[in-house]
Amino acid sequence: MSSSFEQHQKRRLISSYFSVVLSIALVLFLLGLLGMLVLNAKKVSDHFKEQVVVTIFLKDTAKDVEIKQLEKSLAMTDYVKSIDYVSKEQAAEIMKAENGEDFMDFVGYNPLQNSIDIHLKADFVTTEQLEKMAADAMTRNFVDEVTYDNDLVNLMNNNVQKISFWVLVISGIFTLIAVLLINSSIRLSVYSKRFTIKTMQMVGATKQFIRRPFVWKSVRLGIIGAILAMAGMGVVLYYVNQTFPELSLLNNPTVMVGLFVVIFAMGIVISWISTHFATQRFLNLKTDELYY
């Protein structure tokens, strides 16, 4: 009978530990994902900004020397990331591939123009910079037109600011939720031992002596939960990097390692603090208050 009761208590204890570890792991995992989003938000926004194309259309009278000089001067600027010269023949082939038919069969000639496609560095994708660059290009007499999607640029910059603000707000909320959930799970675990705590206190054990095994047990559970969370984060990071290699998420391992260290430390610190205050609460209760 006694053996059966002990096994039952042991199963309950294991179940309690499992729920604490699972709670810590899930909360830290979600917090880690949010951290990855925050750390890579600028990189993601920069990637989309650098997809904006500024096209300089050239007159048919433009000489090769003039075009080369323009390309060289653009390449030497601080705001240009890459330059692609597209001849009118290449442009016709691109349109043919996109439309599935040769429009020159109907027109009878190639009405397209030679052009230079420019991708700017993300920090310079602003309306002011684009207008300045377009005005500078138009000073050359062999440039016919400069085009870019100004509405898209404005929309993108406005949305990046809004998204950055809300990501920070959500990060703060998630951090608070993480602390509360982990604290709640650990308090429930300590609550199940409240009579043991009071018994030890009644036979003369000091508060520090009683608290120590509970704190170390919770810290070990926090470490296990943090390791599980980091393993999940590693899988997600690897999958996202394989799916979207252009984001280059693994190009800055120092930042990622720093995030993993923070998540690991949070698992330890939150577990330690929560257990300390939970045990302190039950140590300060009177015996008759343990039943409420």
Image (cartoon, rainbow, N blue to C red):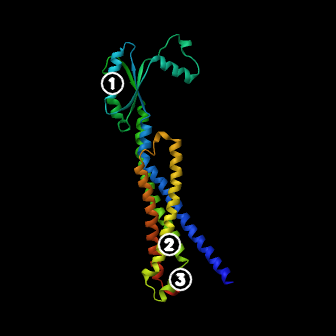
28 shown above or below 287:
above
Quadrant location, the C terminus: bottom right
**What amino acid is at disc 2?**
Lys
Asked if residue 37 can be seen in this view, the reply is: yes
Indicate the position of residue 105 as horizontal and vertical percent values: 56, 12
Q: Nearer the viewer, residue 118 or 7?
A: 7
User: Which mark, residue 196?
Assistant: 3
List the single residue furthest toward the top: 108
Q: Is residue 215 toward the left or the right of residue 64 in the image?
A: right
Q: CA distance from mark 3 to mark 2?
A: 15 Å
Indicate the position of residue 41 as horizontal and vertical percent values: 43, 46
Quadrant location, the N terminus: bottom right
Name the element at disc 3: helix
Mark 1 and mark 3 lie on one chain; the one further toward the N terminus is 1
User: Which mark, residue 217?
Assistant: 2
Name the element at disc 1: helix
Q: CA distance from mark 1 to mark 2?
A: 66 Å
Give neighbour class at mark 1: few <14, some 14-19, many 20+ (Cα, 10 Å): few
Residue that carries the numbered disc 1 in the rendered image: 72
**What amino acid is at disc 3?**
Thr
